[in-house]
Image (cartoon, grey):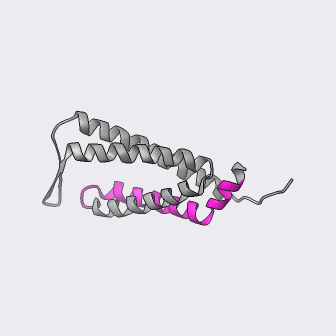
Amino acid sequence: MSTVHTSGWVGWGRFAGVIILVSGIFSGIQGLVALIGPNTYYVAAGGSLFLFNVAGWGWWNLIIGILLILTALALFTGAMWARVIAIVLAVLSAIVQMMLIPAQPWWAMIVIAMDVLIIYALTAHGEELRSTES
């Protein structure tokens, strides 16, 4: 019987999985609402107007939501590929949120902070998450 030292960051790794799961659920719901809802989504920010094709945006959100849910479930098993995909998705999420700062500054900053926590937990302590599942 081998003893593996794990730190409190194992909990943060699981937290990252939960956040990714919740994000996937929200993305899926947003995608469904966009597909069922009106034809255009408008955001006015600082004198600029952003126009989105809601159908295309809805399909992307639905697909990304499903991928996030599957990644989160695999992350709970400690799969290395899930950690890599979760890190890539968190980096992409932070980049997208940087573009959304003019439209929703507080929300964008909160999501960026969560993405940084996810990236740190999975890069610095992700191996511990895998060792607790064995």
Residue at the extreme right: 1
- The x, y position of residue 89, in whole percent, is 43, 57
- Residue drawn at x 69%, y 49% is 133
Secondary structure mainly formed by the magenta segment = helix
- The x, y position of residue 105, in whole percent, is 30, 59
The span picked out in magenta is: 102-131
**Relative horizontal placement of residue 18, taking residue 109 as reference (left or right):** right
Q: Nearer the viewer, residue 112 or 106?
A: 112
**Relative horizontal placement of residue 17, taking residue 44 as reference (left or right):** right
Q: Is 108 colored magenta in this rendering? A: yes
Q: Is 31 colored magenta in this rendering? A: no
- Residue drawn at x 35%, y 38% is 29
Residue at the extreme front: 81
**Relative horizontal placement of residue 3, taking residue 13 as reference (left or right):** right
Circle count: 0
- Residue drawn at x 28%, y 55% is 104
Residue at the extreme top: 36
- The x, y position of residue 49, in whole percent, is 14, 56
Q: Name which quarter of the figure residue 45 lies in.
A: bottom left
- Residue drawn at x 77%, y 60% is 5
- The x, y position of residue 127, in whole percent, is 65, 61
